[in-house]
Image (tube, grey):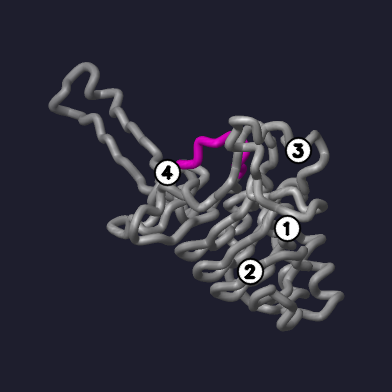
Amino acid sequence: MFRQNFAFKGALNSRSLADPSQGALNLVFFKLETVLYGADPNAKHPMKGFPQICFIRNTVSNPNIIIGEYTYYDDPEDSEDFERNVLYHFPFIGDRLIIGKFCALARGVKFIMNGANHKLDGFSTYPFSIFGNGWETVMPQAGELPYKGDTVIGNDVWIGYESVIMPGVQVGHGAIIAAKSVVVSHIPPYTVFGGNPAQQIRQRFDADVIQALLDIAWWDWDVGKITRNLAKIVSADIAALKHCE
């Protein structure tokens, strides 16, 4: 995304009013600057000629799926139809999938929502009641089905290929989830998780640096400030990041 600024200057010799041959109207356009602000957050496909990358905030229609700006889904088959990866998401349950800004979601990432849960406290977990014809007599009552709440993914999170996120999981800012992981528990900020079930592999930075990153919250800056300070955002110099203007 860019903006070009132009200035117009008109110079009119007073003699030209009486005698056009003695003067001229001089029109001069000066190109002052071209200001680049990276990708257009309102574009479905921000990379020209590369449709497998999609800013899914611009394609998701379900009001219970909330996506932050610049978050993309990468899928060569149909990157726009991200909603097909949000499973068992029934409107009568009301749970939400919330994904922050600047997240990178690899191909085949799946989010299992609360509609997938079965009643667990009896001998059988089979959902007899949904088939009716006399079996509806064992319809679970309100509160008997497990409910884990909203699934919340923070900002600047990278979720690897074909990972599965289970209902109600909360993933902290700056976390990384390895490919084909099954995430069943909350992930702290700036932590790498992987495996089935996913477990902590390592913490990305020292605790004091993580706290500073959370306080700075660069993802909430305006795009101009982000653009001016990209080199500091992608480096690991926390002192420099603290002094961005």
Give whichever of discs 4 and 3 has the lower sequence position: 4
**Labelled pair 2, 3 in contact (Cβ < 8 Å):** no
Q: Nearer the viewer, mark 1 or mark 3?
A: 3
* Location of mark 2 (residue): 182
Residue at the outermost front position:
134
- Taking the spot 58% from the left edge, 46% from the top edge, the residue there is 88
User: Label 4, label 1: how many angstroms apart (C-alpha)?
Assistant: 46 Å
**Labelled pair 4, 2 in contact (Cβ < 8 Å):** no
Q: Write down the region rendered in magenta.
A: 59-66
Q: Choose between 99 and 113: the one closer to the eye.
A: 113
- Taking the spot 39% from the left edge, 42% from the top edge, the residue there is 6
Examine the structure image and report whether residue 62 is included in the region drawn in magenta: yes
Q: The C terminus is located in which quarter? A: bottom right
User: Label 2, label 1: how many angstroms apart (C-alpha)?
Assistant: 11 Å
* Location of mark 4 (residue): 5
Residue at the outermost bottom position:
202
Q: Nearer the viewer, mark 4 or mark 3?
A: 3
Query: Does the rendering let one see residue 227?
Result: yes
Residue at the outermost top position:
18
- Residue 46, position as x, y percentages in the image: 40, 53
Q: Nearer the viewer, mark 2 or mark 1?
A: 2
Could you say which quadrant of the image residue 74 lies in?
bottom left
Disc 4 residue type?
A: Asn
Q: Is residue 52 left or right of residue 86?
A: left
Q: Choose between 92 and 127: the one closer to the eye.
A: 127
User: Few, some or many C-alpha atoms within 10 Å of disc 3 (few <14, some 14-19, many ≥20)?
Assistant: some
